[in-house]
Amino acid sequence: MRDEDELIRAARSGDRRAFDELVDRKRERVVRTAFQITGDWEDAKDVAQGVFLRLFKVLSRFDPGRKFDTWIYRITVNAAIDVLRERGPKGMIQPLPDVSTLAIADPSPGAERALDLAELQAAFLRLASLLPPKQRAVFVLREIEGRPTDEIARVLDITESTVRNHLLQARRSLRAGLERDYPGLLDFALGGGSSEERE
């Protein structure tokens, strides 16, 4: 099995098999990221298809001195934001449909905490779907994809301070939404440490 750098080099020089293998390796991440931003499975698949068509056309111009994942994230996020602006969010940020969820009827110790955590996650995801596109993209990349601030800045072509500002505004909106719509979950959320303390 070829490593990623070797695949990229081969695909850049026109090796279609290498390109197809590269797409296979990146498809899940591209679809997942697009889905988290658009909130719609069909839109996410459309975005992914467009991303890989664009990638096929522009891969020869990729600078090997740059990080490939950051580059493909940038194409994906921009395409997803365009769809979000054009069509509006259709759903909430959520796990992909085939990801298993916590069992609700679990009688074991700690099941109540797991249920609270699942409820809190669902609340955060619903509220995050209401964020403006750039805030939503920053929130998805930082809090769901776990990308570092400097990489998000490169992906979105904004400064790191703008990333932090978008994230701060998103967190404030989410906290206000929790206070307004889910007051019973607020103590549980803060008991685990607020997300503002994690950065």
Image (spheres, grey):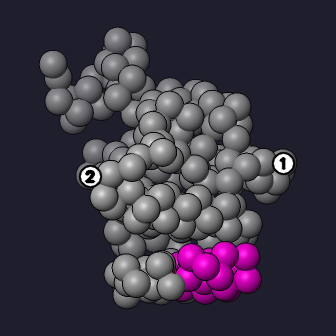
Q: Position of residue 151 (x, y in %)?
A: 38, 65
Query: Which is more toward the observer, 108 or 126?
Result: 108
Of marks 2 and 1, which one's residue comes earlier in the chain? 2
From this viewpoint, which residue is outermost toward the top?
Answer: 17
- Tag 1, which secondary structure? helix
Residue named by callout 1: 87
Residue named by callout 2: 65
Name the quarter where the C terminus is drawn. bottom left
Query: Which is more toward the observer, 173 or 108?
Result: 108
Q: Position of residue 38 (x, y in %)?
A: 68, 49
Residue shown at 56% from the left, 76% from the top: 185
**Left or right relative to 80: residue 27:** left
In the image, which residues are magenta?
167-186
Q: Position of residue 183 (x, y in %)?
A: 65, 82
Residue shown at 40% from the left, 17% from the top: 20
Instruction: Please rate how many residues cluster around mark 1, counting C-alpha atoms within 10 Å: few if below 14, some from 14 to 19, many from 20.
Output: few
Q: What amino acid is at disc 1?
A: Arg
Query: Which is more toward the observer, 60 or 93?
Result: 93
Asked whether 171 falls inside the magenta stretch, the response is: yes
